Amino acid sequence: MGRNTSYDVIVLGLGGMGSAAAAHLAARGQRVLGLERFGPAHDQGSSHGGSRITRQAYFEDPAYVPLLLRAYELWDQLCADSGTDVLVRTGGVFLGRPDSRTVAGSLRAAREWGLAHELLDAAEVRRRFPTLTPADDEVGLVETAAGFARPEATVAAHLDLAFSRGAGLRFREPALSWTATPGGGVRVRTGAGEYEAGALVVSPGSWAPQVLADLGVPLTVERQVMYWFQPTGGTGAWTPDRHPIYIHEAADGTQIYGFPAIDGPDGGAKVAFFRRGIACTPETVDREVHPEEVAAMAGQLAGVLPTLPGRLLKAATCMYTTTPDEHFVIAPHPEHPQVTVACGFSGHGFKFVPVVGEILADLATTGTTKHPIDLFDPRRPALEATP
Ligand SMILES: Cc1cc2nc3c(=O)[nH]c(=O)nc-3n(C[C@H](O)[C@H](O)[C@H](O)COP(=O)(O)OP(=O)(O)OC[C@H]3O[C@@H](n4cnc5c(N)ncnc54)[C@H](O)[C@@H]3O)c2cc1C
């Protein structure tokens, strides 16, 4: 295949963010080409493992809340457009000491933005949610709007929508290089040929340190582990209509988060550490989960979710791509305005997928967006490489 100049926008990387960008761009009538290293909705990057927590009372920073409010509208739209339950509201319980980041930060965001919530003492948490046994000095913030998204189904839904709106999607065709052309467009080379377009969206997940090396943003790729346990006594108390998603922050700051049993009576319930990662690269990541890791998780659960670690059903790895301040990078490329970059989602990006798709479509087509993205500037001081 030779040159092809008939595209408005090329999307490099069709994972969580890129598939959403492709769907939004195609919906606006843009001629889109999507390029993906692996197959559709694969398990080699950051958007797999069946479930992702969604919440609005955002302890990381209340500045994310307006994006989440818009994301929820778009999640509902995606459910309607795709006819699937890619987002499920179960409610959420955020547990820890009152001054923990998880509780105090979530409460601050909930109050600032008037989000529906309740603050429960430990005894009330134990009464309302019998699987959760916080210590007496801990509390639980209940957030009504919290729930989970299904990552593979979300990526598949966005790809389907992009395709049905005319996007060209090329799988198992990694981009080998991209360049901004002097005429203000872009050229992307793959093993199969070269493609030209007016604009480029680069959303390469854990491949960003290579694909976006010229940005100079210090990114750390981290191996993370997800565990599925069959709870003692079965999953009866764990069905999504009865069991919330939860986050627990221990006194030493260690956070775990988990889900109801979303895969039926034999699928177990998933739990993971938040940010206990090991630095890796996509090429060197150890995909095996080791017995001592399972033991560490079971030990962490003993106090607060004692019935969960009945029997380990499976475990899997996934990668975070983390910035020093754990805020995202979403912006026009500082040197090439026709290139839009999206990376560094720092282990908390999935709940934003539909709104990031909208923002990337805004930036790729108009160079600007009405959404607040100043926090995600690649030139912010927190990202200045340390000498
Ligand atoms: C274990 C785990 C738990 C998480 N839990 C949550 C959670 O509960 N809530 C939440 O909000 N977030 C969560 N996250 C984070 C969230 O899943 C990520 O922020 C999000 O999936 C990142 O999407 P992405 O599009 O940047 O990366 P990806 O989905 O990995 O997409 C990047 C894509 O680019 C492709 N690519 C790379 N290089 C090239 C190339 N040269 N050519 C073509 N294609 C290329 C890759 O193959 C990949 O498909 C979690 C992440 C993990 C790993």
Image (tube, grey):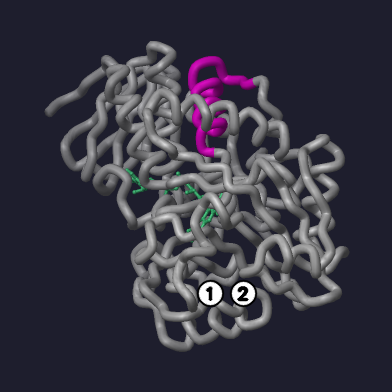
Q: Is residue 182 visible?
A: no
Q: Which residues are magenta?
A: 353-369
* Residue 89: quarter of image: top right
Give the residue displayed 65% in from the left and 68% down from the top. Answer: 130
Q: Is residue 196 visible?
A: yes
Q: Give the numbered dot on residue 305.
A: 2
Q: Position of residue 214 (x, y in %)?
A: 50, 45
Q: Where 170 falls versus 4 (above or below)?
A: below
Mark 1 falls on what kind of element?
A: loop
**What amino acid does circle 1 point to?**
Leu
Task: Give yes or no for contact between labels 2 and 1 (Cβ–Cβ under 8 Å).
Answer: yes
Residues at marks 2 and 1, CA–CA distance in whole angstroms: 6 Å
Q: Is residue 358 magenta?
A: yes
**What amino acid does circle 2 point to?**
Leu
* Magenta-colored segment: predominant secondary structure: helix
- Front-most of residues 119 and 327: 119
- Front-most of residues 278 and 101: 101
- Front-most of residues 158 and 377: 158
Quadrant location, the C terminus: bottom right
Q: Where 264 falls versus 1 (above or below)?
A: below
Mark 2 falls on what kind of element?
A: loop
Q: Give the numbered dot on residue 38.
A: none
Q: Give the numbered dot on residue 308.
A: 1
